Amino acid sequence: MLGAIIGDIVGSRFEGRRRNVHTKNFTFFHDHCHLTDDSVMTLAIAEAILQCQGDYSKLAAKATACMQDWGRRYPKSGYGPSFLGWIFSDHPEPYNSYGNGSAMRVSPCAYAAGSLEEALRLCDTVTQITHNHPEGMKGARAVTAAIFLARQGKSQAEIRAYVKDKYYTFDPYIDSNNYQGGGSCQVTVPQALQAYFDATSFEDAIRSAVALGGDSDTIACMAGGIAEATFGIPRAMREQALTKFTADELQVLLAFEAKFGAAKETTAVPFTNAPQDNAKNEPLPTYLAPEAPHLSEYMRKAIYNGIACIQESFLKIIPGDPTTQQEFSWIRGLPFNPTFDDMIFRYKNQIFSIYVDLVPAGQKWHTFQNPDHLRQLRVCQEHGLIPCCYPLHKRSLQPLTDGWNLFHTGTGEPIDPQVLATDIPLPMDAWEQSSYAIDVLIRNLTEKGCEILSWSDMPGIVPQIWFRAKAGEARWLVVQPYKKGTEPPAAPKLTLPPNLQMFPGYYVNVELSNENYESGPINRDTFIHYKYKMHEFPQTGAKPTIIN
């Protein structure tokens, strides 16, 4: 079980397209590594199994209770919206998911079982309480079976043959540079298995899984759970991993290991925590701020290099510190996977969205290198932003050209912000108003003592905010901005999925007005006044009730 958690810890800071590292050459345990939902739910299943004391007839109920308890104790561990709804539900029901959340948490089942058949029964029991889709069940079964067989001493080749016969086929080679990520069992479980089948040690399995990209923590979690049973875990690696645990997490791990056995220790391969080839790419330069802790250090450095160069360009044309000037400001100057790619800045009344492109040595930069360019063009067109690419040399992370180094994502033509910027007042579009309104609600909820569980200002994502009230219950919000002088929006017409129906839901109408409290245009770079009303979300045609 510890192997799965170590995989999760190591992969935690590389999850997501802009965080992926695509190399085995990285520091294994980093200060920014942490346990995510993968580990939390694995420990929850372990505790449920311990509570059964050998009688697994009540495992489903105990697993449900433990998963909800651990999920509520650690609400910000990275759960998906549907699973978050399940965690806080008074009447949790399976929601037909085929996400890899089913396969990431099952390693305790393989340790508690006395036979392969029992391992699969335990796996089915703890899986179908949430992930009752056939693919979700299959992914969990494949991982459980592989771990159990590895514990029985079966070779990688034997396990591969079994899994290939029962569950999945495999590609002989995985190209991490072309890997398309995803969170489904269909995508990630075969990749995790392949990382294990190709591994020469426990550490090698984790590094291979992380280097794939995509959902790095979960792929490494699944691969690590299997590799632990085959290779064992170096003592130094175990000791370092345990420093990432809280007291209650460590208590469950040690209790489970005491009853069902710990991973065997290995001294065959020394563990030093250093990058594989000892490349001196860490620590990061001092100008990198501590934000975005889960971003790949390589990608974080690339984005910050872009920010620094753009800032330097503005310093040359705007006297003094540009961040203090009305003409220039960063809207998104930190790489938090923002809505419109890596960074956004405003110059005068124009907004520029920037996608950082990495150009391999000997290649020329051109547009449409990947689907993200097309996505950026589409959303920028919808929201009145200028789509820019900022190409950097992949090895040195230096700008491709002198000057602004900005190119239009669609045409490839150079972009000069001074030429495109305008003093003409430009109104905020619907996304900008929505993003502002969401920020308003987050600030106000926090001031009232509520805990923000998750939020998004991505266009089309509803609900925008999940929060926990002072009383402890989870709630969700749909945010609807509107301009003063217009009719407040009616209750949104949504088909509520089961996970939303389980919780109090509200829609919030946020009235926005310009700096003069007028009903005229709400322009960029002006002071905005607001007031809001929160309404109960209508259920079965009930009339909305104003509660705040």
Image (cartoon, rainbow, N blue to C red):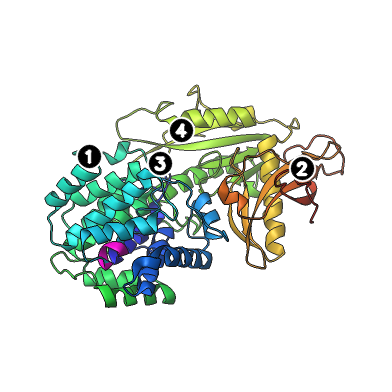
Determine the CA span between mark 1 and mark 3.
42 Å
Q: Which residue is mark 2?
A: 526
Residue matched to label 3: 398
Q: The magenta stretch spans which residues?
A: 108-112
State which mark lies toward you, 4 or 2: 4
**Image coords of residue 248 (percent x, y):** 43, 75
Q: Image quarter for residue 453?
A: bottom right
Q: Position of residue 515 (x, y in %)?
A: 83, 44
**Would you call the spot at circle 1 few (<14 residues within 10 Å), some (14-19), or many (20 or more)?**
few
Q: What's the amino acid at mark 3?
A: Gln
Separation (CA) of disc 4 from disc 3: 21 Å
Q: Are marks 4 and 3 in contact (CB under 8 Å)?
A: no
Q: Secondary structure at mark 4?
A: helix
Question: Sequence-wise, which precedes: disc 2 or disc 3?
Answer: 3
Q: Nearest to the eye among marks 1 and 4: give it.
A: 1
Q: Is residue 423 magenta?
A: no
